[in-house]
């Protein structure tokens, strides 16, 4: 039966009803796994012995990711005790300044919570709008003495005015988009400057390390940084950050005719894979699948053509991959690398559920209309 469903998933074109049913069943099993592993005090990763390398506020962010997945699948599940306790945990983290307490990772935590509350309570919710205001204030801009020529301008870091990186910037932009902030908003437009400086494209990035492959690195701040070993004088692009940069440019209203978007899609076509996070192997793999799903949904096309000319129905292939990796208890876990907490099933499962929900969601009309390409994908176009 499973093999048959996988075969259904790989058919080109829109997902069949059987495929959608299989995906929804997988999501339900994932949520049941999360419900069964929730801490009695609310949330996940809240054991008595917290590892010293784990910020104590991370459980709040994971609770937000889980609750967003629950609300998008079946809002009635939010009333179940495990998920209600997770909601209570988030409520206790609200600060007077509109942020959600995250210590050194407040920008990350607040971004995750705003995305979740926008789905649960609606974009007009006072907490959502308060969080949006705080996130905008945490973005590096002229208020901190940076002009658009600065490699910090427009970015966001883990906390307010910590060194910016593309991972936190794209998470912040996810929150703003989920909260209904339009592409023309200054926050998105400021972010374009930072995103462009994280791209290996010398025509739009004056940094000495910038190459020509069109992919993205972790941050342009300072001397620049990638999460993989780079050759002297250059920083290597990798998968999760390239999808993050690609997605963020689309969120800011750019389309496939923009050379930065075109170059990014060219990199993604050349490195198309669902087997690993290109450049990082198994590291950050579920993060990679999550950001990929949001990016390709925003792109607005069902198919993407790789550099060999093969067309891929990304929805079907991504769903098949995740269904194959799902554990018997309904969870997912990164068995290759525990970097960035993906060795914790709650985080990997939250990413997987959210990715599958993007798969079954309809394409976003605004992106589809703005993106112009031929059938061969010539618009070529983590951590």
Image: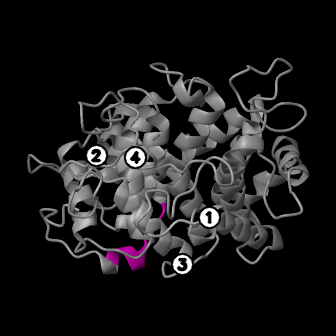
Q: What residue is shown with label 2?
A: 10
Circle 3: element type: helix
The Cα atoms of the two marked residues, 3 and 2, are separated by 40 Å
- Residue mark closest to the camera, 4 vs 2: 4
Residue 5 seen: no
Queried whether the magenta region covers residue 366, the answer comes back as yes
Q: Secondary structure at mark 2?
A: loop
Quadrant in which the N terminus appears: top left
Estimate how packed mark 3 is, as few (under 14), some (14 to 19) or many (20 or more) residues with alpha carbons within 10 Å. Answer: some
Label for residue 277? none
Point out the stretch of residues depicted in magenta: 361-368
Q: Which residue in the rendered view is the most extreme toward the front?
A: 145
Q: Which residue is mark 3?
A: 186
Q: Disc 4 and disc 2: Cα gap in Å? A: 26 Å
Q: Are marks 4 and 3 in contact (CB under 8 Å)?
A: no
Mark pair 1, 2: CA separation: 49 Å
Q: Is residue 49 left or right of residue 111?
A: right
Observer-side mark, 4 or 1, equals 1
Q: Position of residue 357 (x, y in %)?
A: 53, 54
Residue 68 point in image, percent of width and height: 67, 54
Q: Position of 157 compared to 114: left or right?
A: left
**Which residue does the image show at 40% across and 46% down from the upper left?**
241
> Disc 4 vs disc 3: which is toward the camera?
3
Say which residue label 4 marks.
Answer: 241
Give the left or right position of residue 178, taking residue 220 as reference: right
Find disc 1 in the rendering and name its residue.
Answer: 144
């Amino acid at each position: 039966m499973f093999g048959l469903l996988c075969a259904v998933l790989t058919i080109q074109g829109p997902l069949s009803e059987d495929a959608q049913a299989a995906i929804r069943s997988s999501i339900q099993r994932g949520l049941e796994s999360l419900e069964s592993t929730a801490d009695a005090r609310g949330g996940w990763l809240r054991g008595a012995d917290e590892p010293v390398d784990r910020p104590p506020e991370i459980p709040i962010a994971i609770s937000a990711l889980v609750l967003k997945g629950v609300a998008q699948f079946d809002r009635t599940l939010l009333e179940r005790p495990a998920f209600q306790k997770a909601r209570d945990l988030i409520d206790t983290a609200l600060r007077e300044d509109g942020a959600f307490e995250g210590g050194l990772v407040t920008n990350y935590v607040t971004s995750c919570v705003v995305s979740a509350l926008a789905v649960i309570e609606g974009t007009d919710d006072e907490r959502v709008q308060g969080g949006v205001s705080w996130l905008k204030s945490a973005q590096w801009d002229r208020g901190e003495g940076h002009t658009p020529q600065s490699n910090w301008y427009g970015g966001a870091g883990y906390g307010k005015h910590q060194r910016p990186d593309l991972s936190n910037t794209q998470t912040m932009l996810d929150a703003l988009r989920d909260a209904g902030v339009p592409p023309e908003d200054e926050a998105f437009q400021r972010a374009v400057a930072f995103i462009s400086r994280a791209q290996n494209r010398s025509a739009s990035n004056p940094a000495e390390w910038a190459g020509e492959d069109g992919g993205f690195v972790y941050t342009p701040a300072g001397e620049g940084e990638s999460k993989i070993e780079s050759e002297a004088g250059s920083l290597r692009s990798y998968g999760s950050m390239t999808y993050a940069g690609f997605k963020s440019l689309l969120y800011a209203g750019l389309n496939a005719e923009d050379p930065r978007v075109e170059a990014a899609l060219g990199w993604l076509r050349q490195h198309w894979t669902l087997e690993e996070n290109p450049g990082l192997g198994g590291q950050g793999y579920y993060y990679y699948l999550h950001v990929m799903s949001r990016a390709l949904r925003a792109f607005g096309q069902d198919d993407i053509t790789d550099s060999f000319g093969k067309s891929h129905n990304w929805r079907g292939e991504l769903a098949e991959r995740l269904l194959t990796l799902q554990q018997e208890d309904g969870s997912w876990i990164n068995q290759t690398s525990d970097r960035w907490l993906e060795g914790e099933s709650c985080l990997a499962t939250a990413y997987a559920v959210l990715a599958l929900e993007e798969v079954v969601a309809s394409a976003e009309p605004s992106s589809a209309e703005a993106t112009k390409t031929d059938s061969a994908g010539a618009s070529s176009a983590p951590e």
